[in-house]
Image (cartoon, rainbow, N blue to C red):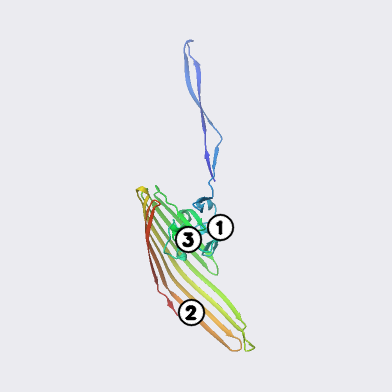
Amino acid sequence: MKTAIVPFLLLLNILVAVNAQTKDSVILVKDSITVKLPDVYVTSERPLVTVTDDALSFDVPNLIRAKPVNTAFDILGEIPGLVKEGDNVSIIGVPTTNIIINGRRSSMSLSQIVELLKSTSASKVKSIELLYSSPPKYGVKGGSINIIMEKKVNEDLSADISLTGKQAFYFSPTGLVNLSYSKKKYSLDLSYSANYNHSRSTEDMNAYPIVKDRPYEILQENTAVGHSMNHTIGASASWFMDKGREVDISYYAKITDSNSKRYSNTLFVGIENAESNNKLSGPKNLQNVRLNYAHSKNLNAGVDIPIIRIAGINI
C-alpha cells in the first residue's frame, strides 16, 4: 500500500474597485489571497501475489516491507507456500524443488546457489515465482523457485552494507557489501561477503547389545569443534541492446579456509576404553563463470564454466 500526501493551494484573485478623484474614472487594483486547503491523501494498493503462466508471482518489495530481511536467501522464509529449514528450502507438496535465477538454470549445486543468495542484498530481488511443475524451457524436473532480480536503468550508483551475527555456542559474524552501477544500456553489480563461523557440538550415544545371552554396555561421547573463514565474491555485467537483445556475464567465487577437530571417547563397560580424534583443515575454492545471450523470449543460450579446487589435510 502506498500513500502520497498532495498539498493544495487555492489562489483567489480579487479585483478591488477604487474611486478616483473624478467621478468618471475607476481604477482597478489586483490583489491575491492564498488559502491553504487540508492535505489530500491518495492511496493505492498493489497485490502481493499474482498468477502468471501457471506460476505464483510474489511482489518482493511489497512483501518484505518492515520485515527483518537482509539477503535474498532471507526472503525465501517470508514466501507463503515455502518451507525453509536451515539452508534447505522446498515447495510444500512438491517432492523436488529447484532454485533458478532469472529463469536460467545454473551448473552450480543447490548449496552453492544458496551461498550466492546469502551474499546478495534483498533490495536486488524484484519478484519470486513458485512453479509447482517446471516448464521444459527451464531444463529441470519437479518444482522450481524462480528468483527475478531487479534490473534498474538510469541510476548511477547504489550501495548496500549490512552486518549480522549468529549466536550459538560461539558468536559468528557476517558482513555484506553490494555495489550497483547502471545506465540505460548497461549495468554492473559487485557483491562481497565475509563470514566467520565458529561452532561446537556434542553427542552422546549409548548402546546395550546382547551377545550370546550376555548383556554389554557401550558408552560413546563425541565432541566436534570447528571454525572457518568464508569469502564470497559475485560480479556481473549486462548489456542491453535493441530488439530485446541482452548479453550477461557473471562471476562467482567462494573461498573457504576451515579447520575442524572431532574427538571421540568410547567406553566398553567392564572391557576397555578407546579414544580417537580427527582433524581436517585446508582451503576450498569454488569459481563459476557464466556467459548468456538472450533475444527477446525466443532465444536464450549460455555456457557455465565451474572451477573447483579442494586442498585438505586429514590427520
- The relative height of residue 4 versus residue 266 in the rendered view (above or below) is above
> For the view shown, which residue lies furthest in the top direction?
23
Residue type of the residue flagged with mark 2 = Asn
Number of numbered labels in the structure image = 3
Q: Earlier in the sequence, mark 1 or mark 2?
A: 1
- The relative height of residue 14 versus residue 131 in the rendered view (above or below) is above
Q: Secondary structure at mark 1?
A: loop
Q: Earlier in the sequence, mark 3 or mark 2?
A: 3
Spatial CA distance of label 1 from label 3 is 15 Å
Measured as percent of width and height from the top left, residue 27 is found at 47, 16
Spatial CA distance of label 3 from label 2 is 35 Å
Residue type of the residue flagged with mark 3 = Ile
Disc assigned to residue 81? 1
Task: Report crowding for label 3: few under 14, some 14 to 19, many 20 or more residues within 10 A (C-alpha).
Answer: many
> Image quadrant for the C terminus?
bottom left
Task: Report crowding for label 2: few under 14, some 14 to 19, many 20 or more residues within 10 A (C-alpha).
Answer: few
Q: Which residue is mark 2?
A: 278
Q: Nearer the viewer, residue 171 or 189?
A: 189
Residue type of the residue flagged with mark 1 = Gly
Measured as percent of width and height from the top left, residue 242 is found at 35, 48
Q: Which residue is mark 3?
A: 99
